[in-house]
C-alpha cells in the first residue's frame, strides 16, 4: 500500500498486488449481485448486466470499490428498473424486493 499526504490528510492507494486481489473480490461480488438481481428481475437480465458494469466502473473510482459496488448497483436498479415498471408489470412483490 502506498501512503501519502494530500491537503493535510493521510491517504493510501492499493499496491499492484493488492489491486489484483481486490479485482478478484470485486469479480466475485459482481457475480453474486448479478445472480441475485437476475433472479429478482428475470425479464431484465440485459439491463441488470449493464447496471452492474456501470456500477463497477464508478466503484473503482472510490477508495473502497468492494464496499461501494452493492449500493451503486442498488441505486442503478432503483433508477432504471423499478421506476420503469409498475408493480403489476412482472409480478414482483415490490415491498419484499426493496427490503431484501
Image (spheres, helix red, strand yellow):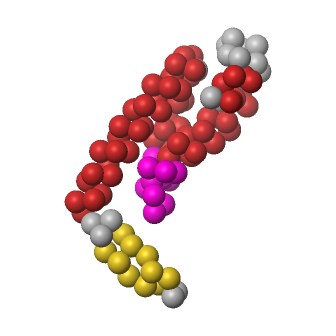
User: Quarter holding the C terminus?
Assistant: top right
Position in image of residue 81 (x %, y %) = 65, 29
- Is 68 placed above or below 14 here? above
* Secondary structure predominantly adopted by residues drawn in magenta: helix
x 73%, y 31%: residue: 83
Looking at the image, residue 49 sits to the left or right of residue 25; the answer is right
Position in image of residue 70 (x %, y %) = 53, 42
User: Quarter holding the N terminus?
Assistant: bottom left
Looking at the image, residue 89 sits to the left or right of residue 26; the answer is right
- Is 71 placed above or below 86 here? below
Question: How many numbered discs sit on the rendered protein?
Answer: 0
Would you say residue 46 is visible in this rendering? no
x 50%, y 46%: residue: 69
Check residue 86 for magenta coloring. Answer: no
| Extreme residue toward the bottom, this view | 8
Check residue 65 for magenta coloring. Answer: yes
Position in image of residue 86 (x %, y %) = 77, 21
Rendering quarter of residue 82: top right
Q: Which residues are magenta?
A: 56-68
Looking at the image, residue 19 sits to the left or right of residue 92; the answer is left
- Along the line of sight, which residue is nearer the eye, 61 or 2? 2
x 35%, y 40%: residue: 27
x 32%, y 49%: residue: 23
Amino acid at each position: 500500500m502506498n501512503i501519502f499526504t494530500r491537503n493535510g490528510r493521510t491517504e493510501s492507494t492499493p499496491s499492484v498486488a493488492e489491486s489484483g486481489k481486490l479485482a478478484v473480490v470485486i469479480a466475485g461480488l459482481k457475480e453474486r449481485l448479478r445472480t441475485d438481481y437476475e433472479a429478482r428481475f428475470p425479464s431484465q437480465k440485459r439491463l441488470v448486466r449493464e447496471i452492474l458494469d456501470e456500477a463497477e466502473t464508478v466503484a473503482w473510482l472510490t477508495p473502497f470499490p468492494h464496499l461501494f459496488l452493492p449500493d451503486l448497483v442498488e441505486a442503478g436498479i432503483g433508477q432504471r428498473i423499478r421506476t420503469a415498471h409498475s408493480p403489476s408489470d412482472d409480478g414482483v412483490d415490490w415491498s419484499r424486493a426493496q427490503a431484501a
